[in-house]
Image (cartoon, grey):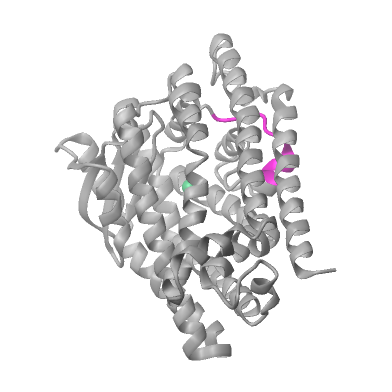
Amino acid sequence: MSLKLLVLIVFVLVYLYNLMLAVIHLRSADNPIPDNVKDVYDAETYRKWRAYHAEKARFGILSSTASFLIELALLAFNLYAAFAGLFGKNPITQVFAVLLLSSLAELLLMPFSWHETMVIEEKYGFNKSTAKTFWADQVKSFVISLGLMTGIGALLHWLWTSLGDWLILAFAVVMTAFMLIFAFLYPVLSRVFNKFTPLEDGELREKLTALLEKNGYRVRAIQVMDASRRTTKSNAYFSGFGKMKTIVLYDTLVEAMTPDEICAVFAHELGHGLHKDTLKNQIMTFVQMAVLGVLAWLTLRTPECFTQFGFDGVNAGFAMILIMSVEFALIAPLFGLLTNWRSRKAEYRADAQAVKEGYGAELISSLKKLARQNYADLAPSPLLVKLEYSHPTLSQRIDAIEKGGSAYE
Ligand SMILES: [Zn+2]
């Protein structure tokens, strides 16, 4: 069997796996709601929720099928090599050409994301994007992702031509550096998309500061992010290295919750901080990067990966596409199983922190509000929770909080 055929088969299998998940999800819509979350939606909202999820799930199948067919055609008919042929001989231009075609193919899917945001979310009252912010976001993310991918592709090309088999080690180091730079850059990047204003003085500011300081941190700033420009969903996070932290609250959170509920949400985030969950996640990400490095090395040293798809020789951009949509896509579900299991445990621990800080009841009411705002699934298929969920279900979390935050899966 040729390598190309094997690649195409794996590509189809990955699609079928995701299709299976989508079907399981659709079929779980009739699961009974557990007693402790029966009061999250009223009957009318629940009906709306079911309709929203069913419509989104069906549409998701349609858009991922379209995406699958486009990418399958690009791979099967050697279109990447044909397109790159129009761009001369310079290896970096060749890398850019392949990634440009991949980004343009994604552009073909724009009508789908338009429909999802501007039609489906609009119909159910989630959408806050105007046509203008929608297009501005599309343009920004097209430019940023193409730029970033070309940068990585060029780097990969350079590493391979100058280091050869030492690439694996260099790749892991460079990607980790990228990750760290991105962690530094994230606050800057999020400012491209959002506006931040300092939280005004008052009860909330005092309580949040006290909560952090009691646990040995210091507050650099507490900021409110204008997430309501795009979404009605709420969240909070804190960032910064060492003991100095910047707290970011979505304006949607500040508007919807009482100060004590915001403190409860934040005490949960604090729990993540105290248990170094972010650091642990970064270690897991490093392991993933190392795996990606091995895949990159294996791909680049196998000429058939390129010649069988119409290229004369190695193209680092095409290698990235093979790695991401075929090779890593095949092992990603296994990684997901492990990281999601760890993450769900970390969520229980973070909830336990909020209980310890005396915000158990407020955490439950805030989680219910969040679930309502986010239109959370109250009774997902247990199999999907194991495979895909980074958080326990609302019902499981409330159960654990009521038992004093000590119950693990
Ligand atoms: Zn959490």
x, y (%) of residue 255?
A: 29, 27
Is residue 369 or residue 362 the one in the foreground?
369
350 within the magenta span: no
Q: Is residue 222 left or right of residue 278?
A: left
Viewport quadrant of the N terminus:
bottom right
Taking the spot 42% from the left edge, 70% from the top edge, the residue there is 93
Taking the spot 45% from the left edge, 29% from the top edge, the residue there is 117
Figure check: 385 above or below 219: above
Is residue 281 or residue 61 the one in the foreground?
61
Q: Is residue 264 left or right of residue 120?
A: left
x, y (%) of residue 266?
A: 37, 44
The residue most toward the top is 44
The residue most toward the left is 201
Residue 160 showing in the rendered view: yes
Figure check: 51 above or below 7: above
Q: Which residues are magenta?
A: 376-386
Q: Residue 216, located in which quarter of the rendered image?
A: bottom left
Count the labels in the image: 0
x, y (%) of residue 105?
A: 52, 48
Taking the spot 44% from the left edge, 63% from the top edge, the residue there is 149
Q: Is residue 142 left or right of residue 312?
A: left
Is residue 96 or residue 33 the one in the foreground?
96
x, y (%) of residue 58?
A: 65, 28
378 within the magenta span: yes
Q: Residue 312, located in which quarter of the rendered image?
A: bottom right
Residue 259 showing in the rendered view: no
Q: Residue 257, located in which quarter of the rendered image?
A: top left
